[in-house]
Image (spheres, grey):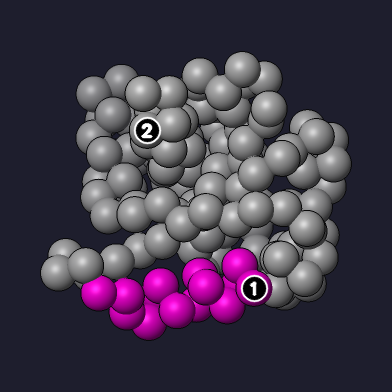
Amino acid sequence: MRILGLDVGQKTVGVAISDPLGFTAQGITTIRRTKKSQDILEVKKICDEYSVEKIVIGLPKNMDGSIGFAGEKIKEFSEALKEVIDLEIIFWDERLTTVAAHRAMIEADLSRSKRKKIVDKVAATYILQGYLDLISK
């Protein structure tokens, strides 16, 4: 079963996909956002290409666990996505995933410009891998 992981930001959407057995997540692309309908069509194409059965979306929360403005925007995006793609959508607490992604890329000695290009894809991988680790227990 393939699971899609999304890190939805204001300018880009980081995309990761699980292996067919659901053990590992791999970043596959970053969608440059244009308008919501076009962004959703891009996600749908990926879902069709990989025969995705479930979507995990990073939900930004405040450090106290509450959902702020960014989280509400993600929920709105998810509702619009559900209207076009009839798949289960799971929200994953994404607090600190971008921080972890940056840290891993710094440790890998990637330049700042390279990090900027792939940070959302790496964050999507962290989001999806966290979910995969949870369900494999």
The residue nearer to you, when weighing 25 against 55, is: 55
Residue 137 counted in the magenta span: no
Query: Which of the 4 quarters of the picture holds residue 101?
Result: top left
Placement of 40 over or under 133, stated as above or below:
below
Indicate the amino acid at tag 2.
Answer: Leu
Report the predominant secondary structure element of the magenta stretch: helix
Q: Mark 2 points at which residue?
A: 134
Residue ID at (59%, 27%) = 18
The residue nearer to you, when weighing 15 against 62, is: 62
Residue 72 counted in the magenta span: yes
Indicate the amino acid at tag 1.
Answer: Glu
Asked if residue 83 can be seen in this view, the reply is: yes
Q: Within 10 Å of the Cα at label 2, are there few (<14), some (14-19), or many (20+) other Cα atoms?
A: few
The quarter of the rendered structure image containing the N terminus is top right
Check whether the beta carbons of the residues at disc 2 and disc 1 lie within 8 A of each other. no
Q: Residue 103 carries which label?
A: none
Placement of 14 over or under 41, stated as above or below:
above
Q: Mark 1 points at which residue?
A: 79
Q: Is residue 118 left or right of residue 54?
A: left
Residue ID at (41%, 61%) = 59
Q: Position of residue 38 (x, y in %)?
A: 79, 66
Q: Where is residue 88 in the image (x, y as percent from the top left)?
A: 65, 53
Secondary structure, mark 1, is helix
Per the rendered image, the range of residues in magenta is: 66-79
Secondary structure, mark 2, is helix
Q: Position of residue 66 (x, y in %)?
A: 25, 74
Residue ID at (31%, 46%) = 97
Q: In this view, does 130 lie to the left or right of 48?
A: left
